[in-house]
Image: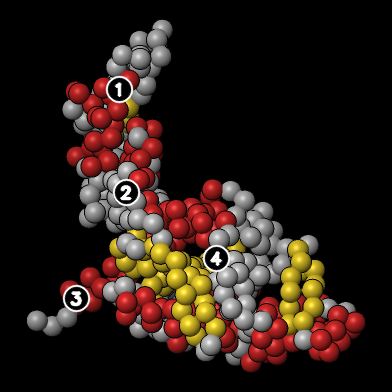
Amino acid sequence: KNHSKSTAPHCLGLTIANKRKPWAIMFTTKTVGLAAATSLLLVSPAAAFAPSHGLASLAAPPASARLCPTTQSNRLQARPALLSLRAKIDSRLVDSRLGWVGRPGSSMPPSEMQMSEQGTLEIDGANIAYDFLPGDGPTIFFLPALNQTRHGAKSNAIKTWCRRQGRSFLVADYFATGKSDGEYKDATISRWASDAAKLIDKICSEKGVEKVTMVGAGVGGWIMLHTAQMRSDKVLGLVGVAADPDFTETLVWPALDEATKEKVMAEGIAEISWGGKPYTISKALIEDGRKMQLLNKGPNSIPIECPVRLIQGLGDEEIPPERALELSDAISGRDVIVTYVKYGKHALDDFEDDFRRIYVAIEDIEQQVRVKDRLFNMNRPV
């Protein structure tokens, strides 16, 4: 039965076939906003995060697209009609509030999808190992957490998403981590931030990349804040996932017992337990961390004007959740949004939703930049 009312401005129509047989449903709608997006979710998973505007053309699907009882004989015939809905969502629809809709998914079969390029960049006598996935820009540059390699859960998830979206991705092992050269006792925030800046220079000059969106997890969030200041002309936006600037000085060092502090100072390196996980810290990391602090200079003291998205778990076992608010207050730019995740741990990689928030943040940044550029061009004198 059809319960839709054509005169209602916000209604959903339900078409149901024979109740005695397996049936499928299709919602048709004249609404805009979340209801419209929900209607598409029930029709096609590929269009689950369709933007709210521009859906009028999908409100009345042709008779061939309406589903009837889903039997083995007609299941294959219904699929092309459903998939054709995706084609109607063109690249002009850029509302990112409901997910990754800024660009259509890759139409290439898995065998033809781009494979990442593995390489090294020599920086101050050390080879820094990196992976670069060619594709559309802006490039997503992921910075891992402390003691993590470039092949962690978040890195692999973002890389897979970028491959499916046909866009470029960059990740590297920090100096003295993973496949990169160096002694860990010599690793510092300054060194990691400088290396990240030089990696940006490399892909911009050799790969034709114009802008990068940096995603930093844990200490990667601290590094990206410094790198963004070094290469402000090449950074489109920042996404911090449990970003922990200043953690060595304000959190870790005060919590260490005197014996551990003496070992770090005497031997230059020590293993500690923090948040229930083992970490390696060094004298150089602690001393350099004091010089690289960002949150001790007051409000609006970090000169970053690009869009910033901060994702923070309320159940973080390593840093206090209010650290995200402190960072938001210290960044000079106005376009800073903090997202808190109920029960979210420090890693924020337990559920698919944890990764999806990163994708949404990336596309929200890109949308805001497009809107800002469009308004700037409209207001320019002719």
Q: Please report whichever mark, 3 or 4, sits nearer to the chain's N-terminal start.
A: 4
Disc 1: which residue: 76
Nearer to us of marks 2 and 4 is: 2
Q: Does dot 4 land on a helix, a strand or a loop?
A: loop
Q: Answer yes or no: is residue 158 visible.
A: yes
Q: Nearer the viewer, residue 173 or 372?
A: 173
Q: Does dot 3 land on a helix, a strand or a loop?
A: helix
Q: Position of residue 110 (x, y in %)?
A: 36, 45
Q: Which amino acid does label 2 sit on?
A: Glu
Residue farthest along the top direction in this orientation: 20
Disc 2: which residue: 112
The residue lying at 31 percent from left, 14 percent from top is: 73
- Against 305, residue 95 (above or below) is above
How far apart are labels 3 and 4 at the CA level?
A: 39 Å
Q: What residue type is labelled 1?
A: Leu
Residue 377 — which label?
Answer: 3
Q: Where is residue 272 in the image (x, y as percent from the top left)?
A: 80, 72
Q: Position of residue 207 (x, y in %)?
A: 31, 73
Q: Does dot 1 land on a helix, a strand or a loop?
A: helix
Nearer to us of marks 2 and 3 is: 2
How far apart are labels 1 and 4 at the CA level?
A: 41 Å
Location of the C terminus (image quadrant): bottom left
Q: Which amino acid does label 4 sit on?
A: Arg
Residues at circles 1 and 3 in contact by the CB criterion of under 8 Å? no
Tell me where residue 251 sits by quadrant: bottom right
Q: Please report whichever mark, 2 or 4, sits nearer to the chain's N-terminal start.
A: 2
Residue 150 — which label?
Answer: 4
Q: Please report whichever mark, 2 or 3, sits nearer to the chain's N-terminal start.
A: 2
Nearer to us of marks 2 and 1 is: 2
